[in-house]
């Protein structure tokens, strides 16, 4: 698999991205809160108010000619010298002396109002009174420094300076902090989406078809277990079974689609009827797929034996609502403590034969390799049309691997955006290297916002030794 293929936009699943984002909104919220509080604290701690005071003077020569142009030109030359004077060390020294400060912590700006002979002086400081007094100190000392100025300049005050009531740089920490929080929130969400996109899990069906070097045996779309609020609160539905009256037709059709493909393989080789179903990790839905495929066969009038070979963490007895006390563990038969007739139970409602376990065991790999397990599979194969074996996840233990050489077919259940592609590929290779025929992968719990939910899934049937595509017209 090349990285270019993995990271191509063809593998982009909008639903997976949004789901990751929703699941990590708590992280976005925490980071945004930290950013807001941090920005607010920083602004409050480092805020320095700045007050300004402004005065305007009319600049004219003592011997005014009355010509506006002449006065403007004169004012330009005087203000240019004035600007240089304000920046001089001698002026700064005299202002410090008059204002009784060692540092003004502000600035003075002298400028010409364009098109006029008006001089504007603006003083800025951290103290409004100091800013006001600074303008007075500038005008008081200019005549003491007259050698630096035109001797015939006259400054008539047009607008007097006033003490500022509010700082010029008003602090708005709340708005600034919210802006910072929003920016950080967007960055965090983009990072989450980027990580989700770059995560090498199976997000779309084309990954299995094009990059896993195996068949896509079927897609099972996401199905809500509990459709009502009451059901969600009470967790009434413990398993997704096609016999449930609240299960959608689409889910049933997805299972029937897989069943027809398994049936097709059996039609080609009628002596081979043992199917092993496993997954890479826990909670990928392998037991759900195993039981529902068995129910689909039973619905067609076939005799099916379901073996729960996940001795470490059995789940099928719960899915079938079998009381724990009524279960005779298959491990006891493998240990020679009882016979097949005691372990095998027939479920009248579903017409399934079940070999179950209810207790968790360790070191079960030895049970899988035992002759008793081989005999159990052989006997079930002879008495039933189909044998469905549910095994532990392949990435956790080697139990499924130990059984692969004792079954006819195997398939891997892959939950969307759950297991990493490398792990899935390793399990596929293990199945292919066994004596069992690897049929492909079932993509489970699939959702994509680009799916047209009104389109019916494809169905297949066995006809004259060929798989023929059909559609349900109901």
Image (cartoon, helix red, strand yellow):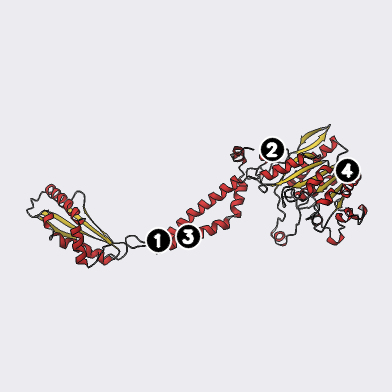
Q: Which residue corresponds to mark 4?
A: 385
Residue 153 versus residue 298: which sits nearer the camera? 153
Q: Quick one: label 4 or label 3, which is nearer the N terminus?
A: 3
Q: Tell me: 394 left or right of 55.
A: right
Q: Tell me: 16 left or right of 405.
A: left
Q: Are marks 4 and 1 in contact (CB under 8 Å)?
A: no
Q: Which residue corresponds to mark 2?
A: 209
Q: Which residue corresponds to mark 1?
A: 172
Name the quadrant of the C terminus.
Answer: top right
| Quadrant in which residue 131 is drawn | bottom left
Number of numbered labels in the structure image: 4
Could you say where residue 415 lies in the image, as x and y percent from the top left? 70, 47
Q: Which mark is residue 36?
A: 3
Could you say where residue 307 lies in the image, as x and y percent from the top left? 84, 50
- Indicate the secondary structure of the residue bearing disc 3: helix
Q: Quick one: label 2 or label 1, which is nearer the N terminus?
A: 1
Q: For the residues marked 2 and 3, what is the alpha-carbon distance in whole angstroms?
A: 46 Å
Could you say where residue 150 lies in the image, as x and y percent from the top left? 11, 53
Q: Are marks 4 and 3 in contact (CB under 8 Å)?
A: no
Q: Quick one: label 3 or label 1, which is nearer the N terminus?
A: 3
**Which residue is located at x 74 percent, y 46 percent?**
413
Q: Are marks 2 and 3 in contact (CB under 8 Å)?
A: no
């Amino acid at each position: 698999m090349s990285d270019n293929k993995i990271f191509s936009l063809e593998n982009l699943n909008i639903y997976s991205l949004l789901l990751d984002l929703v699941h990590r909104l708590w992280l976005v919220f925490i980071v945004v809160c930290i950013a807001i509080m941090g920005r607010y604290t920083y602004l409050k701690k480092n805020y320095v108010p700045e007050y300004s005071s402004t005065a305007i003077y009319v600049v004219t020569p003592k011997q005014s000619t009355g010509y506006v142009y002449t006065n403007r030109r004169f004012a330009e030359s005087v203000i240019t010298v004035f600007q240089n004077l304000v920046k001089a060390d001698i002026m700064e020294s005299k202002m410090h002396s008059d204002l009784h400060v060692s540092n003004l912590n502000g600035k003075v700006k002298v400028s010409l109002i364009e098109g006029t002979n008006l001089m504007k002086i603006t003083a800025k400081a951290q103290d409004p009174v100091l800013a006001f007094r600074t303008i007075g100190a500038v005008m008081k000392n200019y005549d003491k420094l007259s050698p630096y100025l035109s001797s015939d300049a006259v400054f008539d005050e047009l607008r007097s300076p006033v003490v500022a009531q509010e700082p010029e740089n008003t602090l708005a920490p709340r708005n600034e902090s919210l802006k910072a929080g929003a920016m950080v929130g967007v960055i965090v969400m983009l990072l989450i989406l980027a990580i989700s996109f770059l995560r090498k899990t199976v997000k779309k069906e084309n990954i299995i078809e094009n990059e896993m070097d195996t068949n896509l045996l079927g897609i099972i779309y996401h199905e809500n277990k509990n459709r009502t609020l009451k059901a969600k609160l009470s967790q009434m539905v413990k398993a997704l079974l096609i016999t449930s009256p609240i299960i959608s037709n689409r889910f049933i059709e997805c299972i029937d689609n897989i069943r027809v493909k398994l049936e097709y393989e059996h039609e080609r080789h009628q002596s081979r009827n043992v199917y092993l179903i496993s997954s890479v990790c826990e909670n990928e839905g392998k037991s759900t797929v195993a039981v529902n495929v068995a129910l689909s066969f039973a619905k067609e009038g076939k005799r099916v034996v379901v073996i729960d070979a996940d001795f470490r963490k059995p789940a099928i007895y719960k899915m079938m609502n079998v009381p724990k006390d009524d279960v005779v563990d298959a491990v006891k038969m493998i240990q020679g403590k009882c016979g097949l007739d005691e372990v095998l139970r027939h479920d009248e409602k579903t017409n399934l034969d079940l070999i179950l376990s209810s207790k968790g065991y360790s070191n079960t790999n030895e049970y899988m390799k035992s002759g008793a397990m081989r005999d159990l599979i052989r006997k079930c194969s002879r008495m039933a049309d189909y044998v469905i074996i549910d095994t532990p996840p392949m990435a956790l233990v080697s139990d499924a691997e130990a059984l692969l050489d004792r079954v006819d077919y195997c398939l891997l259940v892959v939950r969307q955006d759950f297991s990493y592609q490398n792990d899935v590929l390793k399990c596929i290779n293990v199945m292919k290297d066994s004596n069992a025929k690897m049929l492909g992968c079932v993509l489970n719990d699939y959702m994509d916002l680009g799916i047209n939910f009104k389109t019916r899934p494809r169905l297949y049937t066995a006809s004259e030794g060929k798989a023929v595509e059909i559609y349900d017209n109901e």
